[in-house]
């Protein structure tokens, strides 16, 4: 039965709705719609000019309509008169193929045809910084190893607990919050669920953290590497494949190696096989590669991978097996598009199952200290332009995610790289002005 948003508005005291969507660069776009108008918007969608956002469109394209998914409704805990709605994009009576939520929904449908459902959870790291973005917000947060620092955590009690209270009110079942490995950095965790729901929540979480930080006179940033000497912001994703009912974890096998089934290792084989090609999706900015290929940080470790390897319960590899029945992909960073992250994992994993891809040998070593020069261990791309080219050439990603999406994404990312290349940095001036 379809939810009647107009009726819900009256029952819950919602005065306005944010009809929202995420563009290809992960930007959250929206229109604020008064409750009396939501009935028409639910039927027809809210109109947008696609070219005005990061979508591959021109000013000549017709109106794009964001049709809200009523099942995605979340009432903003810090502003309960507002209801947030994830939306699907339509133009000329057809869904916009290259829109991130549509890409993920197609992968979810493809998995369902094979009898699978992917469940996932994300670990969102972020820094609380000064409004001008130049420094962390807590001048007393200066330890070389600040991870789990109780004093620093509690100095930001008001911000962290307001965000956590919001997740509790929304029914996300948050279970822990901590000060992370960088000064000024935090991580907040909530329970895993179906990958589309996780993506919707991930998109709202970033907005919620930023909004509540602003309310307290601070700024929340998910930038992969906001400070070169400190640990960057990752977005680790835990994933498992379940049967169509969602009741049986198909990755779990008590008799399998580390509690994982053959199906699980085939899925992992696909994720690892296409890791270089998906890097422009999981690590989508110029700054992303300053996290992946970083030097030792103040704390002593970057906590991010630069090679394609997997292991057991060991955080120095790209993929970790923290427990039976699931994997943790440690490659994505805070700039990742919530929908494209899930789509990329599901797409490459399904390819691995279909083609019986072998993930190779598990390495139970400290990859940071003993990983250099090892045979058969591939390195991740060194910069965004190399990653973009690999995405463009990937037959697997094109077959799974669609040419329309890959062409649009690659085109806009090339434009972004050219914009970066036209920038003259202070380093260039300092080192080549007198050459």
Image (spheres, helix red, strand yellow):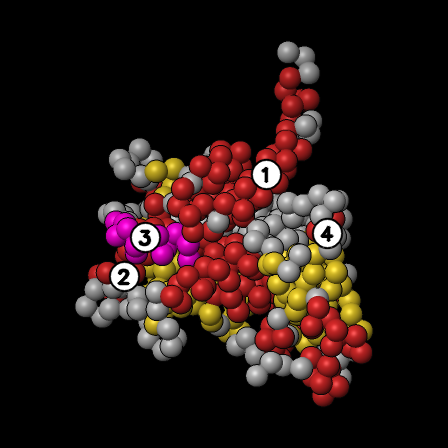
Residue 352: mark in rendering: 3
Image spot of residue 92 (x, y percent): 66, 56
Pointers 3 and 4 in contact (C-beta within 8 Å): no
- Residue 206 at what x, y percent from top left? 63, 61
Query: What residue is shown at x 30% (from left), y 66% (from top)?
Result: 251
Task: Say whether disc 3 or disc 1 marks the residue closer to the N-terminus.
Answer: 3
Which residue is the extreme one toward the front?
Answer: 93
Q: Residue 62 carries which label?
A: 4
| In the rendered image, the vertical position of residue 129 relative to residue 284, given as above or below | below
Residue that numbered label 1 is attached to: 411
Task: Say if mark 3 contacts mark 2, CB within 8 Å.
Answer: no
Q: Nearer the viewer, mark 1 or mark 2?
A: 1
The residues bearing labels 3 and 4 have C-alpha atoms spaced at a distance of 39 Å
By secondary structure, the bulk of the magenta-drawn segment is best described as helix
Q: How crowded is mark 1: few (under 14 residues within 10 Å), some or many (20 or more)?
A: some
Q: Quadrant of the C terminus?
A: top right
Q: Residues within 10 Å of mark 4 (few under 14, many from 20)?
A: some
Question: Which region of the structure is painted magenta?
Answer: 346-358
Q: Residue at x 69, y 84 (%)?
A: 8
Q: Residue 263 — which label?
A: 2
Callout 2: 10 Å neighbours few (<14), some, many (20+)?
A: many
Q: Distance between the residues labelled 1 and 2?
A: 35 Å
Query: Do residues under tags 1 and 4 come within 8 Å of each other at their CB atoms?
Result: no
Distance from Cα at disc 3 to Cα at disc 2: 9 Å
Q: Which of marks 3 and 2 is nearer the N terminus?
A: 2
Looking at the rendering, which quadrant does residue 79 occupy? bottom right
Q: How far apart are marks 1 and 4 (CA)?
A: 20 Å
């Amino acid at each position: 039965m379809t939810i009647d948003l107009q009726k819900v508005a009256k029952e819950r005291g919602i005065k306005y709705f944010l009809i929202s969507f995420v563009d290809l660069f992960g930007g959250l776009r929206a229109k604020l719609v008064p409750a009396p108008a939501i009935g028409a918007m639910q039927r027809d969608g809210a109109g947008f000019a696609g070219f005005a956002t990061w979508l591959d469109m021109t000013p000549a394209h017709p109106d794009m309509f964001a049709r809200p998914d009523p099942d995605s409704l979340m009432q903003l805990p810090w502003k309960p008169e507002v209801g947030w709605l994830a939306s699907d994009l339509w133009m000329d009576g057809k869904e916009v193929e290259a829109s991130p939520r549509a890409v993920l929904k197609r992968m979810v449908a493809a998995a369902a045809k094979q009898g699978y459902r992917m469940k996932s959870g994300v670990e969102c790291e972020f820094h609380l910084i000064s409004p001008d973005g130049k420094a962390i917000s807590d001048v007393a947060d200066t330890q070389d190893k600040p991870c789990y620092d109780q004093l620093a955590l509690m100095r930001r009690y008001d911000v962290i607990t307001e965000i956590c209270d919001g997740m509790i009110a929304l029914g996300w079942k948050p279970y822990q919050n901590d000060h992370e490995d960088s000064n000024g950095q935090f991580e907040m965790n909530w329970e895993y669920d179906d990958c589309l729901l996780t993506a919707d929540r991930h998109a709202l979480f970033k907005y919620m953290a930023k909004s509540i930080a602003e309310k307290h006179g601070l700024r929340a940033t998910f930038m992969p590497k906001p400070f070169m000497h400190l640990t960057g912001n990752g977005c680790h994703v835990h994933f498992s494949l379940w049967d169509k009912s969602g009741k049986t974890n198909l990755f779990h096998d008590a008799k399998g190696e580390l509690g994982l089934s053959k199906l699980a290792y085939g899925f992992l084989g696909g994720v690892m096989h296409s890791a270089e090609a998906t890097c422009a999706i999981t690590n989508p900015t110029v700054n992303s590669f300053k996290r992946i290929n970083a030097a030792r940080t103040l704390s002593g470790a970057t906590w991010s991978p630069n090679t394609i390897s997997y292991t057991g319960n060991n955080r120095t590899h790209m993929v970790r097996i923290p427990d039976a029945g699931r994997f943790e992909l440690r490659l994505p960073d805070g700039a990742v598009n919530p929908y494209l992250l899930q789509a990329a994992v599901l797409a490459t994993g399904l390819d691995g199952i279909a083609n019986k891809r072998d993930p190779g040998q598990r390495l139970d070593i400290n990859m940071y200290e003993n990983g250099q020069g090892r045979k058969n261990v591939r390195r991740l791309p060194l910069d965004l332009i190399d990653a973009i080219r690999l995405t463009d050439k990937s037959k697997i990603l094109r077959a799974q995610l669609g040419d329309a999406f890959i062409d649009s994404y690659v085109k806009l990312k090339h434009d972004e790289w050219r914009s970066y290349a036209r920038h003259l940095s202070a380093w260039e001036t300092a080192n080549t002005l007198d050459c």
